[in-house]
């Protein structure tokens, strides 16, 4: 990794192409540029097929771009690294480990015995409101609780950037709201930088300090939206009643429709 000066996430000129069986080339991402300041929450929003998850996987180091550079806190992303945590849509806990063992997994893999002794694992179990379930196994937990385990495991390793690929998409509406509120609490407490993928306009405006709206064919950044809504983890309904929220929701919905027509 090479040192730099920018604090947060910087994506510069990132493009990604796939070779199809027909021999043709599909451009999945075309010249993506944006910055996400440290401790901010960014949301990649857009219709299916615009490359949101592909971009997130490139930032995670799980895929490589064809052009461009990505830096996290000034260090160039060259592959997977402990500076980035990843939470997937599908529940990704290790089924043979307890909640406590799952949360401790990343620390043990890094040889962080001191952190384990100093109570990092209990701290994050409590932060995601799973205290009392330390000895439970994933199959004994609800879907929302399993996602809390995945979030706690990622945060316990103290990443510079937490990446989330539609982490609440498989949850029922009430549980999804609870998890969104919990995420806001944790981000506020831990001052974590988060980039997440979402298809949900309400979720994007509620959680995002900045929303990166992407278009399709090829995947590209169409607009950067800064909602500027005062965040509250306890009174989301008040936010949804703001005139600013209703204006942005209509605007993004129109952009979504326009993209659907372009792809028709």
Image: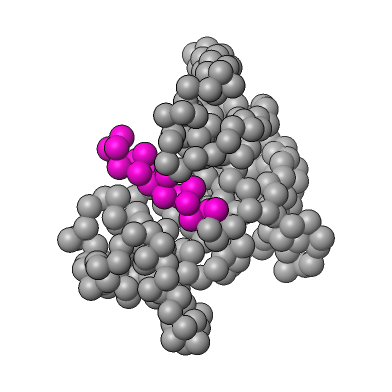
Any part of residue 260 in sight: yes
Residue 117: name its quadrant. bottom left
Chief SS of the magenta region: helix
Tell me how many marks there are: 0
Image spot of residue 226 (x, y percent): 66, 32
Residue at coordinates 68% horizontally, 35% vertically from top-left?
Answer: 30
Residue visible at 53% across and 53% down? 187
Q: Residue at x 74, y 57 (%)?
A: 7
Residue 216: x and y, percent? 58, 27
> Residue 106: x, y in percent?
45, 73
Q: Can residue 51 be seen in this view?
A: no
The answer to whether residue 101 is magenta is no
3 or 16, which is in the foreground?
3
- Direction from residue 6 to residue 119 in the image, left or right: left
Q: Does the magenta stretch include residue 169?
A: yes
Seen in the picture, residue 117 relative to 258 is either above or below; the reply is below
Residue 169 position (above or below residue 76):
above
Furthest residue in direction right, as rendered = 5
* Relative side of 213 to 196, left or right: right
The vertical placement of 24 against 188, above or below, is above
The segment highlighted magenta reads: 166-188
In the depicted structure, whether residue 100 falls above or below residue 112 = above
**Residue 249 rendering spot, x and y as whole percentages:** 53, 21
Q: Which residue does the image show at 21% across and 68% down from the upper left?
A: 136
Model colouring: one colour
Along the viewing direction, whichever of 56 and 6 lies nearer the viewer: 6
User: Quick check: 120 left or right of 212?
Assistant: left
Which quarter shows the N terminus? bottom right
């Amino acid at each position: 990794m090479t040192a730099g000066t920018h604090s947060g996430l910087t994506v510069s000129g990132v493009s990604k192409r796939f070779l199809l069986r027909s021999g043709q080339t599909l451009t999945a991402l075309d010249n993506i540029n944006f910055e996400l300041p440290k401790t901010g929450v960014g949301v990649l929003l857009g219709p299916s097929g615009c490359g949101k998850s592909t971009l997130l996987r490139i930032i995670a180091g799980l895929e490589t771009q064809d052009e461009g550079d990505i830096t996290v806190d000034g260090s160039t992303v060259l592959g997977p690294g402990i500076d980035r945590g990843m939470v997937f849509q599908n529940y990704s806990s290790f089924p043979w480990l307890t909640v406590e063992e799952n949360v401790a997994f990343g620390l043990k893999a890094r040889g962080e015995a001191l952190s384990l002794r100093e109570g990092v694992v209990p701290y994050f179990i409590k932060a995601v409101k799973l205290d009392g379930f330390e000895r439970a196994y994933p199959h004994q937990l609800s879907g929302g609780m399993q996602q809390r385990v995945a979030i706690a495991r990622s945060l316990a390793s103290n990443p510079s950037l937490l990446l989330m690929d539609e982490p609440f998409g498989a949850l029922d509406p009430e549980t999804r709201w609870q998890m969104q509120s919990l995420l806001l609490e944790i981000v506020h407490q831990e001052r974590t930088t988060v980039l997440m993928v979402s298809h949900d306009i309400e979720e994007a405006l509620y959680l995002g300090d900045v929303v990166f709206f992407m278009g399709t064919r090829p995947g590209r950044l169409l607009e950067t939206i800064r909602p500027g809504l005062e965040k509250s983890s306890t009174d989301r309904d008040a936010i949804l009643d703001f005139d600013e929220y209703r204006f942005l929701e209509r605007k993004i919905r129109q952009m979504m429709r326009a993209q659907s027509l372009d792809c028709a």
